């Protein structure tokens, strides 16, 4: 999910921003990488018996990753790190 940027005849790589990502989703070749994910999300959105526990665990692991990468809460403030409580 990187984009190339040229500086003084050398190439550097940056993380693709959200706006660029949304724009690239209009490209069939790019969006094909996400077809399975889109199908899964559609199923979860309409299926009452979706595996909510699994989604809650994934969400929690993503919060763990954010905590690891940004321990000082500089990029992602604490109020956006709430975990999903599910029985």
Image (cartoon, rainbow, N blue to C red):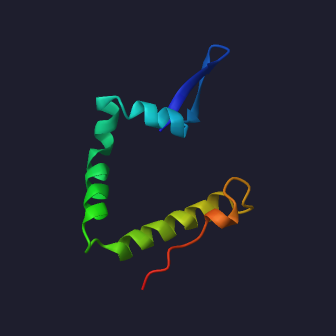
Relative image position of residue 4 (x, y in whole percent)? 54, 26
Q: In this view, does 81 lie above or below 15?
A: below
In the image as oriented, which residue stretches furthest toward the top? 9
Task: Examine the image and state in which quarter residue 65 appears.
Answer: bottom right
- Specify the farthest residue to the bottom: 87
Image coordinates for residue 15, horizontal then vertical, percent: 56, 38
Q: In this view, does 44 lie above or below 7?
A: below
What is the count of numbered marks?
0
25 above or below 54? above
Q: Where is residue 34 in the image (x, y as percent from the top left)?
A: 32, 44
74 or 11, nearer to the observer = 74
Residue at coordinates 30% horizontally, 50% vertically from top-left?
Answer: 38
Residue drawn at (35%, 73%) of the image: 52
- Splitting the image into 4 quarters, where does residue 82 fall? bottom right
Residue 23 horizontal side relative to residue 66, left or right: left
Q: Position of residue 23 (x, y in %)?
A: 44, 31
At x 52%, y 40%, the residue is 18
| Screen quadrant of the C terminus | bottom left
Q: Which residue is drawn at 30% across and 73% down?
A: 51
């Amino acid at each position: 999910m990187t984009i190339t940027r040229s500086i003084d005849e050398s190439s550097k790589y940056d993380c693709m921003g959200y706006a660029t990502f949304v724009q690239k989703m209009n490209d069939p070749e790019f969006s094909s990488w996400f077809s399975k994910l889109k199908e899964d999300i559609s199923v979860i959105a309409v299926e009452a018996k979706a595996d909510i526990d699994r989604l809650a665990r994934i969400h929690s692991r993503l919060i763990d990753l954010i905590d690891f990468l940004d321990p000082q809460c500089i990029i992602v403030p604490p109020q956006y790190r709430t975990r999903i409580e599910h029985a």
